[in-house]
Every structure is written in structure tokens, then in C-alpha cells.
Image: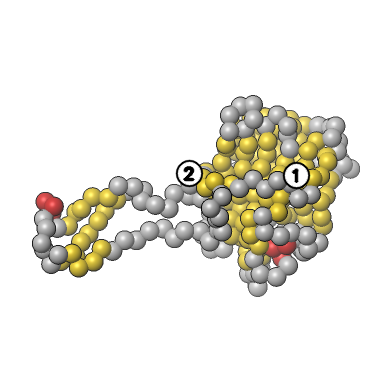
Amino acid sequence: FLSFVSLQLTPILNVHATPSDTVYSDAGQIDLTGDDGTSSVYDLPFTFQIYNSSSEKFAVSTNGYINFYDGSSNYLNKQAYALQDDLYQYGSAKTIYTKTIGEAPNRQFIIQWTNLTHCCGTWYPVGTFQAILSETTNSVQYQYLYQGMGNLGNGANARIGLIDNAGHDKYYSQNQNVLSPRKAIKFTPDGTTDYTIEDNATYLPYLLTLPTVPGDFTLSSPINAATGIARDVTLTWSA
């Protein structure tokens, strides 16, 4: 007989999926940790118009915003503030994920900040939130999957908006307690220097994770598929 089977899995992130969520467990992972960090510059999956500039590349900050660059990696001085605050990826975790979904010319590019905390000292959990860039329409939608303790996850210490640093910044809020779980805010271009803000936009039920379930396993002990042996069982697999 088999006395027990011992399995060790990577812990599942503390994100609050619901039965209606589409879970993408093959997300890309931004190589970024810690406090006040900005990632390397990555390619966008499509050209994205931000204010009057065409962006082909981006970088992500741990502090809840995106920087936009042209095709030559020149900084365009444009930013998307999903939840711009002094945030932190605790320890060595790399919990900013990306995923492209859909087909051209209607693709969406999702960036998700997962389980961030507020820095520093109190380490209050802030929560998980997303920025979704849409091809062709060039809209930006911010989504707040869940919030942590107190008002920090609700935007009380954060700025939410689109920034062009040329006098046309468009804010939804600045240091206001305005967020709630499953809230969506959509910015749609109105000309080249302004955006229309849709409060309480339709929430898009997307959730990004890394692979957390192992692949096929093989019985490595006891050998030769032996049965009726009173001993522990060792299973091995590759993710």
C-alpha cells in the first residue's frame, strides 16, 4: 500500500479570482523587484497612441505607472498612472505581469501589478490592479481587482490619470479615496491633447498569474511501477 504522497507546489498568489474571471496563467513577468524601481524598456505588442505621440515601447515602475517610448527607445515624456504611489514588491518577488490578448487590429495589452504593499515601515497591503491598453482605439482602462487594508488601496495617497508633461495632464483623482474592488476607469482619446473619462466603466474580468500547476509527473520511487510496497512514494515532474 501507499502510506502518503507528498507534493510541493509554488504557492498561488493571493489574488481574488471569481468564477466569471478569465484566468491567464501564462503571463509574462517583468524583471523588477523592490522599491522605487523602473524596468528595462520592452516592446509593446502594437503601436499605441498616447496624446500626440506614437509609442512602440514601454517600461513599468513598481510605483504603479507606465513610461512610454518611441521605436528608438527615446522617452516620450508620457506616462499612465494606474495607481501612482510609493509602492513596493515585497522581498524578491517579481509580481508585475503582462499579457496580450485578442487579434489585430483589436488586441489588448494588460499590465498587472500583483499584491503590492505600501512602502515603507507599515507595509500595508495595497492590492492588485491593472492597466489595459487597447489597439486602434488607444484607450486606457485601469482596473482594481481588490484593495488591501485601510484607504491606501483605495487611492487616498495615489494619483490616477494620464500624463504628458506639456500642460495636458488628465487626472481621474489625486490623493482621494475613490476606489473599490472590481472598479474600472476608462480613458478614451478626445482629439490629440485630451481624454474623456468613463467612471464605472465595464469591468473586464481578466486575471494574470504565472503557471502554478505542475506538468505530468512520473513515479520515480518505488521503481518499475511496483505495487503493494509499504513505503513512501516520490513523484517528480517539471513545470
Residue 186 badge = 1
Q: Position of residue 117 (x, y in %)?
A: 63, 64
Give the spatial CA distance, label 2 vs label 1.
Answer: 25 Å
Q: Position of residue 172 (x, y in %)?
A: 81, 51
- SS at circle 2: loop
| Residue located farthest toward the right when viewing the structure as drawn | 167
State which tag comes first along the sequence, 2 or 1. Answer: 2
Q: Quadrant of residue 127?
A: bottom right
- Residue at 75%, 44% (x, y): give it: 186
Residue 146 badge = none
Front-most of residues 32 and 115: 115
- Residue at 73%, 37% (x, y): give it: 139
How many residues crowd around disc 2 within 10 Å: few (fewer than 14), some, or many (20 or more)? some
**Is residue 87 among what the camera can see?**
no
- Say left or right for 119 vs 185: left
| Residue located farthest toward the top when viewing the structure as drawn | 105
- Residue at 10%, 62% (x, y): give it: 228
How many residues crowd around disc 1 within 10 Å: few (fewer than 14), some, or many (20 or more)? many
Q: Position of residue 141 (x, y in %)?
A: 71, 44
- Amino acid type assigned to the residue bearing label 1 in the image: Lys
- SS at circle 1: strand
- Amino acid type assigned to the residue bearing label 2 in the image: Asp
Residue 26 badge = 2
- In the picture shown, does residue 91 fall above or below 59? below
Q: Position of residue 130 (x, y in %)?
A: 65, 49
Q: Quadrant of residue 220?
A: bottom left
- Say left or right for 43 vs 165: left
- Say left or right for 228 vs 53: left
Please tell me whether mark 2 or mark 1 is closer to you in this view. Answer: 1
- Residue at 82%, 55% (x, y): give it: 173
